[in-house]
Image: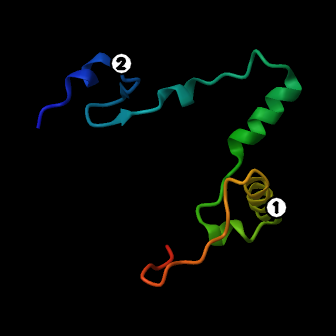
Amino acid sequence: MQKPRWIHEYVVAAVTSSSTTKLFYPAANKVFHSHLNSRFQTFMSTLDKQQDPDSFREAIQHKHWCNAVNTELQALERNGTWSLAAIPKEKRAIG
């Protein structure tokens, strides 16, 4: 199968680090905080080290993630962009 013509019009940021490996997001390795004041550098460094949970089961073990989920659900309800609905009999919930 041939690539669509339009795809050749884009520049891909991938760089080859070896003959078999490609880095698809090299910009992530080139983010510098040196131009920021020292307090903000510390803040950004903390964000870089933060580990997000990999699953819902892992997230609900931490109060700050539960609070974040509840805050988001309240905002969705307040804005009228989300509502709880019953699952139709012929369907099943996602695991």
Dot 2 corresponds to which residue?
Answer: 11
Dot 1 corresponds to which residue?
Answer: 67
Q: Is residue 58 left or right of residue 40?
A: left
Extreme-bottom residue of the structure: 89
Q: Is residue 35 positioned above or below 47 on the image? A: above
Q: Secondary structure at mark 1?
A: helix
Q: Is residue 16 left or right of residue 45?
A: left
Q: Residue at x 41, y 33 (%)?
A: 24
Tell whether label 1 touches label 2 (CB within 8 Å).
no
The structure's colour scheme is rainbow
The quadrant holding residue 41 is: top right
Q: Residue at x 12, y 32 (%)?
A: 2
The quadrant holding residue 7 is: top left
Mark toward the viewer: 2 or 1:
1
Q: Is residue 39 positioned above or below 80 on the image? A: above
Reading the chain from its start, which is encountered first: label 2 or label 1?
2
Q: Is residue 49 positioned above or below 70 on the image? A: above
Q: Secondary structure at mark 2?
A: loop
Residue 63, given in percent of the width and then of the height, sits at 82, 66
**Closer to us: 43 or 93:** 93
Residue 69, given in percent of the width and then of the height, sits at 74, 60
Q: Residue at x 38, y 27 (%)?
A: 14
Q: What amino acid is at disc 1?
A: Asn
**Closer to us: 57 or 47:** 57
